[in-house]
Amino acid sequence: MTGSILSEDGDRKKILRATAASRRQQAHIEAGPEAAILLADQFLRAVPRVPEVIVAGYWPVGTEIDIRPLMRRLIAADHRIVLPVVPAPTLPLKFREWTPDSAVRPGPYGIEVPPDDAAELKPGLVIAPFLAFDAEGWRLGYGGGFYDRTLRRLRGLGEVIVVGVGFAAQQVERVAHDGLDEQLDWVVTEEFAKKVER
């Protein structure tokens, strides 16, 4: 069952993000560590992938669903994995290569990132976390606009598939959006994988 409508208007953003973060925390507790394996299974069964496409994952922080098992399985299927790096607050993300043997270091916002000498690559598939999502593929992010700027740039350069991932309990009735927001192509949770209909 979906939650209440999420509006992005004015000062309500902080309250709504706090509410969504609280819901995600509860979902993280209830779903447990096995949610990471279930999500990987859902993703690999449903999401189409061009052979050897470069996949942008992320290093999970706090109560974000853990996609490290998925990233390892994608590497085993001959995909290269990159992780996002914040170059500056107003710029799109960069992506540097990661393997299970890679060292990671603390980057901006306390997020682990590959070392500076890791290869910088352009992904053809992006896996993005969120605080909340709706059935139309709109996501509530953290407010920095990093993914929206990045996805707009990548889509301008060519075809890219964008997959939002999280817990099923993070779905809400509606996430309000404007011309700066980028829509997801797929949503994958521990319970389902769904292509967004446009």
Image: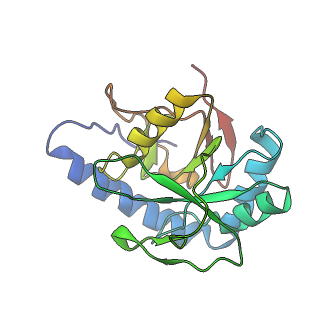
Q: Is residue 166 left or right of residue 148?
A: right
Q: Residue at x 53, y 35 (%)?
A: 184
Image quadrant where one finds the C terminus: top right
Q: Is residue 136 visible?
A: no
Q: Nearer the viewer, residue 19 or 94?
A: 94
Q: Nearer the viewer, residue 143 or 192?
A: 143
Image x and y of residue 51, in percent: 83, 42
Q: Residue at x 72, y 67 (%)?
A: 69
Q: Residue at x 44, y 70 (%)?
A: 111
Image x and y of residue 164, in percent: 56, 45
Q: Nearer the viewer, residue 169 or 102?
A: 102
Task: Quadrant for residue 139, please give it.
Answer: top left
Image x and y of residue 123, in percent: 62, 45
Q: Is residue 132 visible?
A: yes
Q: Is residue 123 left or right of residue 74?
A: left
Task: Quadrant for residue 120, please give it.
Answer: bottom right
Image x and y of residue 176, in percent: 33, 32
Q: Is residue 59 left or right of residue 85?
A: right
Task: Quadrant for residue 167, please give it.
Answer: bottom right
Q: Residue at x 39, y 40 (%)?
A: 149
* Count of residue discs: 0
The extreme left residue here reads: 11
Q: Is residue 101 left or right of residue 137?
A: right
State whether residue 154 is above or below residue 145.
above
Q: Nearer the viewer, residue 126 or 183?
A: 126
